[in-house]
């Protein structure tokens, strides 16, 4: 699906990172990739990169330093001359901007969360725009967490994700004339290094186990990676400004789905109370029929 494509992937810290799963799938799909990282985290990124199917170079990119964007663009211009895809998997909020501190968060911390988690998508797209303009139907894919509602403990990171969604829509509007697509993936909670810094993550993850009709495995980022490959590929050539939910269906449910025995009762025209039993025995064949 991505044969011959050149893709920049940000946000890989360890092998458990969602961006790592995307990088792995991108290589399997035929893409040539590079990664970005910064500071002390870069050593972790380089270690993860060595575990990919093919060698990958890691470039410096601290999204709080404008000069890093210029240097990254210049390095990629020398290396490739064009860029077909960009994966934005960057988010951060200071500790006082999370964990139920919404009303006490300082302006400085809120601005940090916004700058790193939302504005950086625009900054990255702008820096690589000349390279994407030279490609055919380039694609920008960002990782999101559904910002339609207020989540417990997510606080200013949730606000920043709402901003990320708005930034993606405006980028889709601005870059569409160049044939560049911009989309987000609203993923369910996954057990990554970054997730470990969100207070109450275990409780949040447990909500998905109860409510997602397709169920949700927080230790398996592959469904999210597969969606990213689709959005990076020509198969999504007419899709932009979209938020693709990859969360087992959690976002579409108003509450947990019925348990299996409750579904069987409904199929037999019965309630789910103990005293509502069939007047006649139900055969095995009837019990096994699809509902």
Image: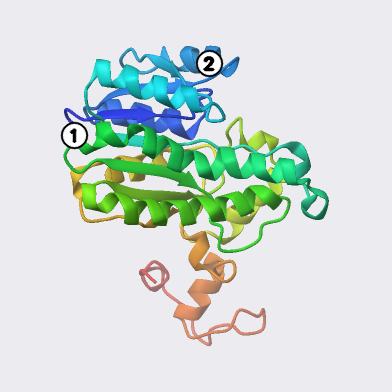
Q: Can residue 98 be seen in this view?
A: no
User: Which disc is residue 42 wearing?
Assistant: 2
Tell me where residue 24 appears, x and y as whole percent: 35, 26
Q: Toward the viewer: 252 or 172?
A: 172
User: Which disc is residue 134 wearing?
Assistant: 1
Circle 1 sits in a helix, a strand or a loop, which is it? loop
Can you tell which quarter of the image residue 126 is in?
Answer: top left
Tell me where residue 166 appears, x and y as whole percent: 48, 57
- Marks 2/1: CA distance? 29 Å
Tell me where residue 53 appears, x and y as whole percent: 32, 17
Vertical relation: 212 (above or below) 220: below
**Along the horizontal axis of the image, is 155 left or right of 34?**
right
User: Which disc is residue 32 wearing?
Assistant: none
Circle 2 sits in a helix, a strand or a loop, which is it? helix
Viewer-nearest of discs 2 and 1: 1
Q: Can residue 230 be seen in this view?
A: yes
Tell me where residue 202 appears, x and y as whole percent: 69, 44
Q: How crowded is mark 1: few (under 14 residues within 10 Å), some or many (20 or more)?
A: some
Q: Toward the viewer: 29 or 241?
A: 241
N-terminal of the two: label 2 or label 1?
2
């Amino acid at each position: 699906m991505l044969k011959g494509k050149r893709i920049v992937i940000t946000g890989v810290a360890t092998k458990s990172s969602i961006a790592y799963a995307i990088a792995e799938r991108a290589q399997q799909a035929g893409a040539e990739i590079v990664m970005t990282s910064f500071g002390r985290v870069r050593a972790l990124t380089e270690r993860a990169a060595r575990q990919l199917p093919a060698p990958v170079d890691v470039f410096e990119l601290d999204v709080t330093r404008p000069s890093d964007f210029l240097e990254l663009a210049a390095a990629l211009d020398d290396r490739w001359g064009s860029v077909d895809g960009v994966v934005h998997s960057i988010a951060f909020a200071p500790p006082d901007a999370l964990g139920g501190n919404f009303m006490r968060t300082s302006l400085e911390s809120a601005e940090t969360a916004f700058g790193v988690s939302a504005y950086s998508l625009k900054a990255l797209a702008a820096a690589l725009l000349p390279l994407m303009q030279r490609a055919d139907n380039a694609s920008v894919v960002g990782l999101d967490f559904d910002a339609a509602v207020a989540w417990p403990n997510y606080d200013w990171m949730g606000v920043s994700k709402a901003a990320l969604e708005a930034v993606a829509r405006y980028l889709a509007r601005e870059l569409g004339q160049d044939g560049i697509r911009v989309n987000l993936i609203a993923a369910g909670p996954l057990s990554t290094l970054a997730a470990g810094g969100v207070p109450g993550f275990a409780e949040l993850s447990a909500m998905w186990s109860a409510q997602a009709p397709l169920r949700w495995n927080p230790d398996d980022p592959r469904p999210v990676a597969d969606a990213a490959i689709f959005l990076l590929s020509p198969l999504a050539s007419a899709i932009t400004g979209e938020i693709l939910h990859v969360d087992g269906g959690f976002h579409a449910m108003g509450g947990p789905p019925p348990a299996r025995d409750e579904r069987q009762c409904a199929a037999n025209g019965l309630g789910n109370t103990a005293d509502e039993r069939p007047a006649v025995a139900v055969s095995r064949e009837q019990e096994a029929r699809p509902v």
